[in-house]
Image (tube, helix red, strand yellow):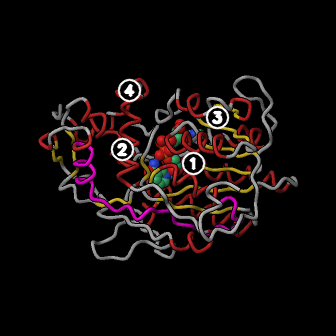
Amino acid sequence: MSGVDQLAGHEPGRYTPKVILVTGAAGFIGANAVAWLLREHPDVQVVAYDAMTYAAHPQSLAMASRGAAARFFFVRGDVRDGDVFATVLDGAARDAQGRPIPAADTVWHLAAESHVDRSILGPGVFVDTNVIGTQRVLDAVRSARDAGRAVRLVHISTDEVYGSLGPGDAAFTEAHPLLPSSPYAASKAASDLLVQAWARTYGLDAVITRCSNNYGPFQFPEKLIPLMIVRAMAQQPLPVYGDGQQVRDWLYVEDHVSALWTVTRSGVAGGRVFNIGAHGERANLDVVRGILHALDRPESLIQHVQDRPAHDRRYAMDATALREATGWEARVPFQHGLEATIRWYRENAAWWKAVLPESQKAAEALYLKGAR
Ligand SMILES: NC(=O)c1ccc[n+]([C@@H]2O[C@H](COP(=O)([O-])OP(=O)(O)OC[C@H]3O[C@@H](n4cnc5c(N)ncnc54)[C@H](O)[C@@H]3O)[C@@H](O)[C@H]2O)c1
């Protein structure tokens, strides 16, 4: 039994994954998922599938699979290319090193265009990848099932599909209406609805998770926490949208991955939704101040910039349904997770320096001009 299963009140799961295909594996959560699965579950094999867009880091999968290469397979592929994806899912392909790939019994569908700022600058690829790509994944899972091979799908979504909360509102439950604000959030909401429809219409073994903002190692430095860490280390101005009082519910990425495992093991299907959160509500400005404090940098580096259009004011997740169904709870306190994250960026400067110019592009286009 894994450490996660030993959490108080958790019933051992009814489903045991053996080969997990992770889409978007070379991105932030994907790389952490690969590392965690290979480390915590020595009987699990991992097939990584990624188109290697700008958001993928070429070194992340090598780092995440170190010491477990025999149980790890990588294929460069696009989720929109349904034929290639189906071949990989069915174990009818070879990996980048020419080894035969095992057929997957489980898919963790993480591949997506994920950056809200970029979705404002160019929404088309968000609809393509997040909506059409998800339909291709669903159809491949359906074809495998129709051919007599059961595949379980975990579709990873976001709190952003629920829209924004006011300061006194109760946290989002799974019953909250879908009210996305950004093109990114709308494309994720659309993909969630496809998963529910495929579960109902075709009886697919599928479940949807919606998590709050993740942070941790391997996150592309265009996102708030790593962006602020690398700029603070370089003594550059830290751009904060508007008054910085936007509240996010921070979840350490390993807690997220352990929740995905718990949901997978639970066997719950039918397109059911589970929220994942860590009671980690914090205003962006306080997060930025915490980073400056940890790095011994002055608050005068903070530079308020014009707020993002349709910027959601507050997210907060109620993960009671997941706790009641499985016993899962987040374990990593924010301060601890933030310190571990800062340490990781300090120790892995070569990793983030390699992607720094690309990571600043959306920020440059939207608000960084002059903030040097
Ligand atoms: N990071 C968060 O805080 C957060 C919060 C809630 C939900 N999510 C969801 O989790 C998932 C992963 O997020 P992330 O932060 O790791 O994203 P990321 O941008 O770091 O990584 C996305 C990965 O998907 C790959 N990809 C993009 N388009 C692809 C395509 N067409 N085919 C195959 N691969 C493709 C990229 O190359 C990249 O490696 C996304 O679905 C996102 O919506 C993330």
As displayed, is residue 99 above or below residue 302? above
Callout 1: few (<14), some (14-19), or many (20+) C-alpha neighbours within 10 Å?
many
Mark 1 or mark 3, earlier in chain: 3
Mark 3 or mark 2, earlier in chain: 3
Q: Position of residue 67 (x, y in %)?
A: 65, 29
Q: Is residue 207 left or right of residue 171?
A: right
Checking the image for residue 349, the label placed there is 4
- Real-space CA distance between mark 1 and mark 3, rounded to the nearest whole angstrom: 13 Å
Kind of residue indicated by mark 3 = Gly
Kindly report which numbered mark, 1 or 3, lies closer to the viewer in this rendering.
1
Residue 169, quarter of the rendered image: bottom left
Q: Position of residue 153 (x, y in %)?
A: 68, 56
Checking the image for residue 339, the label placed there is 2
Q: Which residues are magenta?
A: 263-292
Kind of residue indicated by mark 1 = Leu
As displayed, is residue 128 above or below residue 235? below
Q: Are discs 1 and 2 less than 8 Å apart at CB? A: no
User: Which secondary structure lies at badge 4?
Assistant: helix
Residue 263 in view here: no
Residue 321, quarter of the rendered image: bottom right
- Residue tagged by mark 1? 110
Residue 348, quarter of the rendered image: top left
Q: Which residue is rendered at x = 18% and y = 49% of the image? A: 306
- Real-space CA distance between mark 4 and mark 3, rounded to the nearest whole angstrom: 28 Å
Q: Is mark 3 within 8 Å of ligand 1?
A: yes
- Real-space CA distance between mark 4 and mark 1, rounded to the nearest whole angstrom: 25 Å
Mark 2 or mark 4, earlier in chain: 2
Q: Which residue is rendered at x = 60% and y = 36% of the image? A: 50
Mark 4 or mark 3, earlier in chain: 3
Kind of residue indicated by mark 4 = Ala
